[in-house]
Amino acid sequence: MSYKNILEEIDDNILTITINRPKKLNALNRETIQELHDALKEAKSDDEVKVVILTGSGEKAFVAGADISEFADYSPKEGKGLAADGQKKLFDYVANFPKPVIAAINGFALGGGLELALAAHFRVASDNAKMGLPEVSLGVIPGYGGTQRLPQLVGKGRAMEMIMTAGMIDANQALQYNLVNHVVELGDLLEFTEDIAAKIMKNSMVAISGAIKAINANYDDGVNGFETEINEFGRAFGTEDFKEGTTAFLNKRKADFPNK
């Protein structure tokens, strides 16, 4: 499929989706959110895709925020609809995606850009990255999951401070806060992230999908994460991957998972 605002590349079962609006520092507008949804929906059913990497074009920005010009004159009802639609189409969709999604943060990840990175299953940052949720400086709050996902990663106090001050933190501070898993030089960012993806793909993708579901359940209000884990654990016993993994272990060889 051809897109206006994003680029796609599949190599060795890794789909790299690059947000490509360099003149706008890759800011998210409604069209880009829809394109990202469409690309991910296609990747979900594509057996060739095992891991997704999200990144931004250029060296300045992952995503520098939402495109404010689109909603500056919105009413309260329109603002609520904007947040609900965006969360459903992209941010919640990424968080609950059945295949691993890694954010490779190259440069600024602000507002909706940081919220997109937060929705990914984990994050790798370049050493020039800067992250923040500056929405209160515009008289609004994070609306794409930032008030929920940031505290889960960095703790309530740090999330409160970041959101209230509208300030930015650098990559090393983000690492200290557990907001990102790794910090690497900008030129090594994609290769490093691809290496992690390659390690992931040595394992059962069916089991990984179950693990994503179980881990996420712990953060869903009213959902018993332990119960979800038990169910996913039991479901794994009926997969071809379980048969191959246990057989390979008992025969002291490497598993060759069919991912079924």
Image (tube, helix red, strand yellow):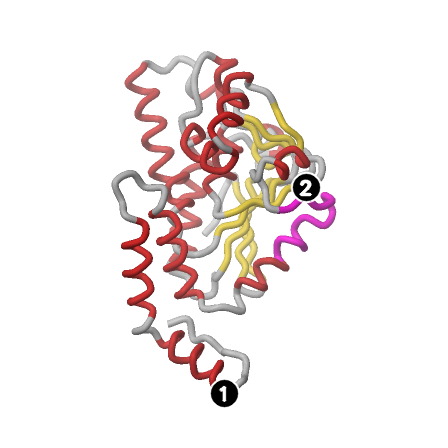
Q: Is residue 246 above or below residue 67?
A: below
Stretch of the chain drawn in magenta? 182-194
Crowdedness near tag 1: few (<14), some (14–19) or many (≥20) residues, C-alpha within 10 Å? few
Q: Residue at x 39, y 51 (%)?
A: 215
Residue extending farthest to the left is: 222
**Foreground residue among 93 and 200:** 200
Say which residue appears at 71% left-offset and 35% top-offset.
Answer: 128
Compared to residue 192, the image places residue 18 above or below, namely above
* Residue drawn at (52%, 39%) of the image: 117
Q: Nearer the viewer, residue 215 or 198?
A: 215
Give the quarter of the image for residue 74: top left
Q: Name the residue tied to disc 1.
A: 251
Q: Residues within 10 Å of mark 2 (few under 14, many from 20)?
A: many
Which x, y percent locates residue 152?
45, 36
| Picture layout, residue 240 above or below residue 77 | below
Query: Which of the numbered marks, if any, corresponds to residue 126?
Result: 2
Q: Main secondary structure of the magenta part?
A: helix
Q: Mark 2: which secondary structure? A: strand
Q: Residue at x 66, y 36 (%)?
A: 171
